[in-house]
Image (cartoon, rainbow, N blue to C red):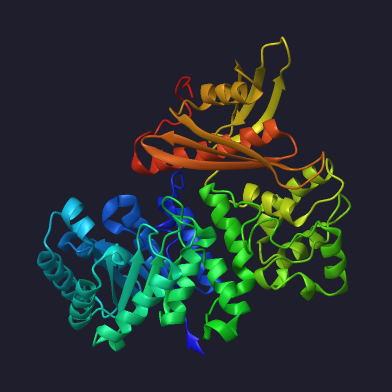
Amino acid sequence: MDKLYIFDTTLRDGEQSPGASLTSSEKLEIAFQLADLGVDIIEAGFPITSPDDFAAVRRIAMEVKGPVITGLARCRPEDIDAAWEALKDGENVRIHTFIATSDIHLTHKLHMTREQAFEQAVDMVLRAKRYTSDVEFSPEDATRSDWNYLYQVLEGVIDAGATTINIPDTVGFTTPIELGRLISSIREHVPNVHKAVISVHCHNDLGMAVSNSLAAVLAGARQVECTINGIGERAGNAALEEIVMATNTRPEIYQVETGIDTKQIYKTSRLVSSLTGILVQPNKAVVGSNAFAHEAGIHQDGVLKDRSTYEIMDARDVGLSSTLVLGKLSGRHALRQRFEEMGYNLSDEEVNRAFVRFKEIADKKKEITTKDLEAILADEITTVPEAYQVARLQVSSGFPAIPTATVSLRLPSGEERIEVATGAGPVDASYQAIDKIIGLPVRLAEYSVRSVTGGIDALGEVSVRIESGGRNFHGRGADPDIIVASAKAYINALNKAAAASVESGDRADVGVAGPAGI
C-alpha cells in the first residue's frame, strides 16, 4: 500500500479556534504527544504572527524528534525569513508558504493580478528553498480558483522547488466528488506533478472535511492536513482520528497506510481537549464518550455475543482500555498499573500526587472509572507552575441568604491568605474572594461545567476561559463538589496568566495587589 502522510496542524490551525489559546509549554506538551502518536509532520505555528508563536515553533523544532516540524509563512520575504529563524535549529524541518489563487481573494483581499500572485509564489518558494530542501506550497482558496490558473501556479512552484503542493478547501466550499475530480485533474494537467506530494487541507463548514479529504486520497492525494478532534477556525478542520481510523478500518477501499499508533488516539484527544478547553461532543466519531457505548437492548445483546455485530472498530485500538473500575481500597500500585494501561507512564512524584487526589475522590465515590482517572490526571499533572493553590474553601448559599465564600489560598511565598466575598452565587462569591487575594486584573470570558461520569456522585469538570493582558487563558478543575472544581479551574487559569505575566515582565508583583473585578 501507499504511505499516507499525516500532517497535523492542531498547533497552528487548531489553535485558531475561538478561545483555544495555548501557552508555549502546553504546545510543547501536545507536540511531544503528537510525536508519540506517530504523525509525520507537525505544523507548530505561524512564526511571524507573534513572539510567543515564534518561540513555540523554535522550541518544538529543537526539542521534538521524529516528525518533520514546519512553520507557516505567507509569500512574503519577512515571513519566509522568520519561519526559517524559528526552524533552523531543528534537525528535520519544512517551510510551508501560501498565497491565495482565487479571484475572490486576489481582487478583494490581496488587490493583486493573477500574474503578480504567480510571480510572488514562485519567488518565495525559491527564497524558502535557499534555506531548506523541504518546502510546501499552498494556493489558498484553491477550490474556488480557476483550475487552469491553478495548474499554472502549481507547475511554477514545483519548478521552483516545492516538494509538497497542498490544495486547501479554505472555506469548506467543495464536495467529495468535486475535490476528487480536482486532484485527478491536477495529476493529469500539471506536467511536473510527479516531483511533489499532493496534499489536501479541508475545512468543515458544510460538515464534509473528512469526506472531502478521503475523496482526495482516493484520487491520489498522499498527504492529509488535519487536527486532533477536528478543531480549527469556524467549524474546524478534518479530524485526524476519523481519517486514520477510516483508512485503517477500510484498507481495501483506500489502499493506503499511515504510521499512526492508533492506541495513542484517545489519549491525544483528551490532552488536546483538556489544554484547549474545547470539549469533545459525546457523539463525536472515534473519540466521543458515546462512540463505543450501546444502550439499546438489541445492540447490547449483539455486542455481548460478538462485538462485530455492532462495532466496526475495537475500542482498544484507539486507546480505550478496559472499563474496570478502582475503589477506595485500591492501592498505589494498582493505580499506577491502571494509568499504564491507559498509556500514561508517570513518575513516582506524579503517581503520588494523583494517588492523593484519587483517595480524596474515592472516599466520595463508590467507583472510580477511566474517565474519572483522566480528569484526575488533567487536574494534577500539569506543566504550569502552581503559584497559587486552594488551601481551603467554604461557601454559604441559599434563599434568601446572600451567597458568601471564604477562600484561603497558598501563595508563592508559602504563606496562606484568607479573604471573604459575596456574589451573585457561590461560584461568583468564590471568584470574587480569589480576586481579592491575587489581584490579577482578569475578565471571566467563559464558564462551563459538565459531568465526567453518570450518577449522583459524578465527578464534575469545570472549564473556564479568562482574558488578561490581551490574552486568553484556559483553566480546568475536577471534583465531586462543583464549587471546589470551579475554584480549581479558575486558579488553574490564573496560574497560567501569572506565569505569562512574569515571563513577559508585565507584573513582577503578581499576588500582592488589591482586589480586581471579573
Residue 402 seen from this side: yes
Left-right relation of 88 to 2: left
Left-right relation of 498 to 399: left
Above or below: residue 213 compared with residue 22: below
Residue 7 seen from this side: no
Residue plotted at (34% across, 62% down)? 58
- Quadrant location of residue 470? top left
- Quadrant location of residue 95? bottom left
Residue plotted at (16% across, 75% down)? 126
| Residue at the limit of the structure toward the top, as seen here | 400
Residue plotted at (51% across, 27% down)? 438
> Along the line of sight, which residue is nearer the eye, 324 or 498?
324
- Quadrant location of residue 325? bottom right
> Along the line of sight, which residue is nearer the eye, 377 or 466?
466
**Where residue 277 appears, x then y in whole percent?**
54, 46
**Where residue 423 appears, x then y in whole percent?**
60, 17
Residue plotted at (51% across, 36% down)? 494
How many numbered markers are drawn? 0
Above or below: residue 122 compared with residue 100: below
> Along the line of sight, which residue is nearer the eye, 301 or 248?
301
Left-right relation of 451 to 284: right
**Where residue 60 appears, x then y in whole percent?**
41, 64
Above or below: residue 486 compared with residue 24: above
**Where residue 181 appears, x then y in whole percent?**
37, 77
> Along the line of sight, which residue is nearer the eye, 299 or 466?
299
